[in-house]
Image: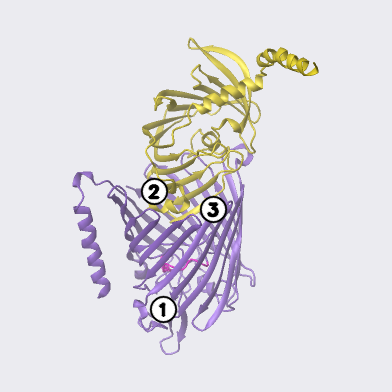
Chain colours: A yellow, B purple
Amino acid sequence: MKFAKIIFIIFALFPFYLSAETAEEQGLRIAKASYENGRGYTDMVSDQLMILIDPKGNEVTREVSAKTLENLDPNDGDKSLTYFKTPKDVEGTVMLSHTHISDDDDQWLYLPALGRVKRISSSNKSGAFMGSEVAFEDFSGTDYRKYEWKFLGEEMENNETFYKLESYPNYENSGYSKRISLIDNLNRTYKVDFYDRKGELLKTLYLEDYVLYKDKIWMANTMKVENIQNKNITIFKWLNRELDVGINKKDFEKSSILRLAD
Amino acid sequence: MLKKYIISFLFVFLQYLVASQNAAAIDYKAYGFIQPEITTFFNGDGRHDQSNSNQSIFVKGTFITYLNNGNQKITINTTGRIDEKDSERSYIDFQKFKYEQYFDDITLKIGNELIFWGVNESFNIIDIINQSNLAEDISGTKKFGQPMISLNYNHSYGNFDLFIMSFFKERIFPGRNGRPRLALEVDKSTVAYESSSKKNKIDAAVRYSTVYDDYDIGIAHFYGNNRSPELNVNPLSQKLDTYYPILSQTSLDIQSTKGAWLYKLETLTAKNGEERHFGIAGGTEYTIYGLRETTSDLGIIVEYTFDDRNDFAFNNEGVLALRWTKNDIKSTSLLAGLVADMSGSSNRFFAEFEQRIRDDLKVFMDMSINGEIDADDFTYAFEEDSQLTLKIAKYF
């Protein structure tokens, strides 16, 4: 009899338990679904343009090409190999990065002027990437497990309804106190507001030109970052993005940097 | 003679490789820069009556092409300089002129190559494969390409490298009008070797390197003509005679990367001719990111080197340097520091500033100020050579 009672209580509580998903759990669920939206790409090659625009409207363009390898181990991060083409004085620079979810990333840099491969510190989370408005942590911090999440509700923008999520970095040395993300009903991130350590709005990221790859993976081919404080704008464009091209895993080892280097 | 044949063969072979590809399909990268330089010296004419100014033009050109779906690579990397005052400083060198063949885990390389070993910022004591050009830069960081055949095997336990080298290149020293230069001239007509094969001696080296967690580790052994000659005063000519002993050097290099802290160590034991010596160099680099809530970083570098040879120029030296990087669109950076002889009172201050001023132009300013230098220190010859060099690089 006692046993039946327990079962009864469990069943009675169950529907209540479901509806009582906390704002944190709901936030985590949506963030996870959004992250998993971009998974399963196996590997990727692309050319990237980075356009830096100052408040006066002056523009400079930087070009890199990159290879990325998805880590099939869900508890470890992806690997990427980036080749810098412009500005001309950095042409031939190669950066290899092994990202980790809970640990600092491993990074190596080949600089043509020095002719050597250097292991570099990756604890520079908040630093600017190549003088842009994009911080290193914006690249390495795409994994939902690097944040605490909270669902804030739904919000209308441009006649579309978005999930509104708040997130706080749970790694050290972040330049952000929080981020507010808008995610659409296909689990694609539309917009992210970044707040600096003092809690002031620092910059807004817009993700545009979403393309569906392999019938299941949504990737944004344009990212625009508007810095609210210094009025600079950085635009990233992915060109010639190809997924699942069959890149050799060994291309992402330290010794392979020299195969790309000059 | 043999060298000429090999170079012609390599040249014809490369031409054949390129010609055998579909001409339209050849994908190559070519880039480089030309860099005029002006130097002014603060203490008037030099101790050896050198001029108080100098002008120079440095050029570097790079050509890379991949053939056969990226399984073969040809790299040409040429540097050269025309110097107003010092003919020893005018040169052209194929730092890299190599053909590479990539197999799954193996890389085969033939030709001129630059190989760097080590982890330190300042005292690269284990770096031995390439010859230094002291006329180009007295600190020895500028190197000449070394002809070699090399094999690299990439195993899951790490990387194994084998280098077979020949056609030794003698060290280049500043000439009579060079500034800075040694007190006495180096006599290029009296070069002697321990090896009876002299320049044609076959040198060999092996290296094992691996990455384990936060550690980058390398173990290497080199056997061949020492790149660094003994300099002996010839009482008749009052010039320096060079003698290249055979060097057998075993080295270890480790870098540990712990967050914003880098710990570096290079150590070696070597038999140079008949005598064995020991050297160790290392230090730490700590970087403060986002200095005072700006985008700037400040790195603090402390390095020390010790060598148990009393007559060795760098047997007990330390460096303290600061590296400031603004992380702006112009890639502005400044490296400044102090090099000091810990067993004497000799010291030197240096500063290197660089900034991109246009997409294809970069400006560099290098300053070197000598403090008091002990008369028995070999750098005493450079005491009055404090200088400022302005360089502008035009990239194409």
Left or right of residue B31, residue A51 in this image: right
Q: Which residues are magenta?
A: B125-136
Left or right of residue B383, residue B223 in this image: left
| Residue B26 spot, x, y in % from top left | 24, 47
B379 or A48, which lies in front?
Answer: A48
Q: Nearer the viewer, mark 3 or mark 2?
A: 2
A216 or A80, which lies in front?
Answer: A216
Please report, as a chain letter, where disc 1 is located: B
Type of amino acid at the residue the image marks with label 1: Val
In the rendered image, the residue lying farthest to the top is: A159
In this orientation, does residue B365 appear?
yes
Give the CA distance from mark 2 to mark 1. Answer: 37 Å
Please report, as a chain letter, where disc 3 is located: B
Report which residue position mark 2 lands on: A92
A169 or B190, which lies in front?
Answer: A169
Residue occupying the point 37% across, 60% down? B55
Is residue A187 positioned above or below B173 on the image?
above
Residue occupying the point 44% across, 39% down? A68
Q: Quadrant of residue B338?
A: bottom right
Type of amino acid at the residue the image marks with label 3: Leu
Residues under numbered marks 1 and 3 in contact, where contact means CB atoms less than 8 Å apart: no
Type of amino acid at the residue the image marks with label 2: Gly
- Secondary structure of the residue carrying numbered label 1: loop
- Secondary structure of the residue carrying numbered label 2: loop
Report which residue position mark 1 lands on: B186
Is residue A255 positioned above or below A171 on the image?
below
